[in-house]
Image (cartoon, rainbow, N blue to C red):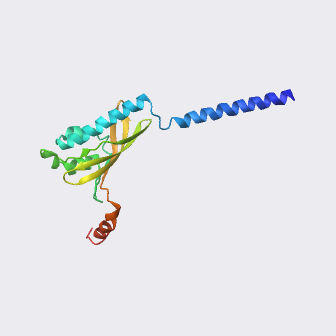
Amino acid sequence: YLRNMNIIKQAVSVFIFLFSVSCDLNQDYFSNSVDDDLEKALINEIIDSWHLAASKADSATYFSIIANDNSIFQGTDDSERWTKTEFKNWSREYFKRKSAWTFVPQKGRNINIKNNVAWFDEKLDSKHMGRTRGNGVMIKEGETWKIEHYTLSLPIPNELINGVIDTIKNSDY
């Protein structure tokens, strides 16, 4: 009887140990450590400087923040899906002006980090387009975060969506 109790105790101990280890692994998925807070602050600064570089027509800074030649920028038009190289070529004329374009980030950018990948969403204001949204994925290269993918979109109020859908359906789009 005592021998069976020892086996049961050992089995329960192993189960409790394995259960607690698995809970700890899952708990780290979206940790809010001091390091994460520092990384989020750094990411915020990088994204803000990226938007500012466009506003100042600083193409060198703007495109240095985009990770590589295969990174993607998606604009609001269905045809606007460019690699970094394609986007650089398309936007060349805009960067010759005093300001390429200006999107002002609003407070409350949401950032999540998992290892060397971060994803974010943000609300932006622009004189030209009004309220827009940006969603992006960043990768960490060494100590630097770079934009791997960015999508600019226009939020459409639910009360207006049917009119927008009809306009698109009836256009030569």
Residue 129 rendering spot, x and y as whole percentages: 22, 54
Residue in the picture at 84% in, 27% down: 3
Residue in the picture at 27% in, 48% down: 124
Considering every residue shown, the one lying at the far front of the view is 159
User: Which quarter of the rendered picture does the N terminus lie within?
Assistant: top right
Q: Quadrant of residue 154?
A: bottom left
Q: Nearer the viewer, residue 83 or 34?
A: 34
Q: Quadrant of residue 140?
A: top left
| Residue 141 seen anywhere in this rendered image of the structure | no
Vertical comparison of 65 with 173: above or below:
above
| Residue 105 seen anywhere in this rendered image of the structure | yes
Considering every residue shown, the one lying at the far right of the view is 1
Q: How many marks?
A: 0
Residue in the picture at 28% in, 52% down: 132
Residue in the picture at 41% in, 39% down: 117
Q: Quadrant of residue 43?
A: top left
User: Which quarter of the rendered picture does the C terminus lie within?
Assistant: bottom left
Vertical comparison of 6 with 65: above or below:
above
Residue 150 rendering spot, x and y as whole percentages: 32, 47
